[in-house]
Amino acid sequence: MSTSNNQTPTYNLKAVVQETGLKPDTLRAWERRYGLPQPQRTDGGHRLYSQHDIDMLKWLAARQEEGLSISRAVDLWHSLQQEGQDPLQATSHAAPGPLNIQPVLPVGNAVTELRRAWISACLAFDERTAENILAQASALFPLETVCFELLQKGLTEIGEGWYSGTVTVQQEHFASALAMRRLDALVAATPPPTRPGRILVGCPAEEEHTFSPLLITLLLRRRGWDVVYLGADVPTTRLEFTIATARPQLVILPAQQLHTAANLLEIAHLLDKEQVPLAYGGAVFNHIPALRARIPGHFMSERLDTTPQVVEQFLMSPRLGWPPPPVTPLSETYQQALAHFRENQALIEAHIWQLMKDEDIPHSRLANANLKFARNIIAALRLGDIEFMGTDIAWIEGLFINHQMPTEQLQRYLHAYSQAVQAQLDERGKIVRDWLARLTLAETRSQ
């Protein structure tokens, strides 16, 4: 077990890089996105790691070598700790399933090797080999195993590679297209429904990540449910007509990003008015659990593989989950801040352009950063808590790192954004001004 000496902050970043073999950007990304490790700081703001931190990093890297994604490795670390075990001393690294729901997927070396081979083929743009691997996996394992252990985990690993800058956008899109093509074929081959009732599945407005809802559609259809798949970017326009025509007993809308969670909120209010139950999930609700209290609907599960069981329990409930859990209305302070920020967004961005004119940042990249930053600030305000942006900052930092932008340039960008907001927003925008002031202070200390 860890001793007090092992917890003493002793090693600087350079020493940890040498000891673990991990890149500095990787260490910073893990710290921001997953909260592991949590090094202390010197008075000058430099990181200091303990021996326990180093051991933890080696443990996480070892789990990656075994085939786990970093997000799954972090989940496993936390699960072992919650069970009272020291992950560094645990002899078994099998991830536990959620309470009352049995895991449905076997995990073994064969499927792990096939996943690695599929990822390699995708990164090499080798479509024939990738398809042959999927065919081989389908002959060896149940459909659910192929979908979760190969496709879902494979896409997750490729996505994390894009985030860290080791995988290109083109490689990620190629792999996603192959996975979606396979799911489309499997959905088309499902038999007619045998159970009463209808379920609508899709994505909220501006959500383009369709793997999860299409996989949910496949799993539920295989269990006999009548599922209508609406695809990506489902707007609220004329949704009442769709509800009246399809007459669903349940609507399922996963959201993966903060701004699409805000768009989900708009749909949730409409479904509430129509008295149609909503079930939802997605990465953003796993990363920011407090978001769940803002959506008038029913959170399904943090694990996609348990969704069919959760949905079936929900549909077979006599009350059918109605009414949904109550949510707190958006406060007047947040309504004013939201309107004020929207009114002045163009002025803020013009101010940023002026402050950053001497920076060596391509026009398209700065414009994209402004778009995503403002979009997520607006989303946090719509959802009633600007602190939700505290998690999404990791994505902005990852965006800069992914495009080989130095951390120092990101710091200057955030300071410029803060200066522009201080200049263009009055007291009605105090929520945003104060948050940005705290953010830039924390960012300065983290360097």
Image (tube, grey):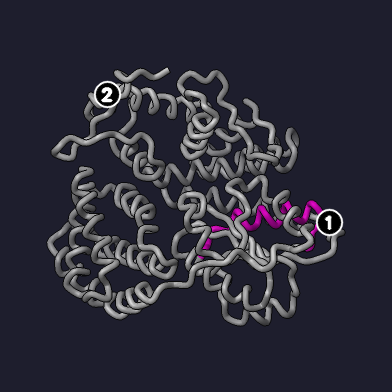
At x 29% / y 60%, what residue is drawn?
365
Which residue is pictured at 23% across the width and 74% down the height? 427
Q: Quadrant of the C terminus?
A: top left
Q: Amino acid at mark 2?
A: Thr
Amino acid type of disc 1?
A: Pro
What main secondary structure does the magenta stretch of the protein show?
A: helix
Instruction: Provide residue 16's location: percent of width, then percent of height.
Output: 28, 26
- Where residue 8 is drawn, which disc sits there? 2
Instruction: State the CA–CA distance, disc 2 to disc 1.
Output: 60 Å
Q: 171 and 196: which one is in front?
A: 196
Residue at the image position 34 percent from the left and 30 percent from the top:
22
In the rendered image, residue 330 lying in the magenta stretch gets the answer no
Q: Position of residue 426 (x, y in %)?
A: 21, 76
- Residue 320: numbered disc: none
Q: Quadrant of residue 345?
A: bottom left
> Is residue 218 shown in magenta?
yes
**Quadrant of the snapshot with the N terminus:** top left
Q: Which residue is mark 1?
A: 191
Is there any visible trace of residue 133 in the rendered image?
A: yes
Image quadrant in which you'd find residue 139:
top right
* First to last magenta residue range: 207-226
Is residue 368 found left or right of 248 in the rendered image? Answer: left
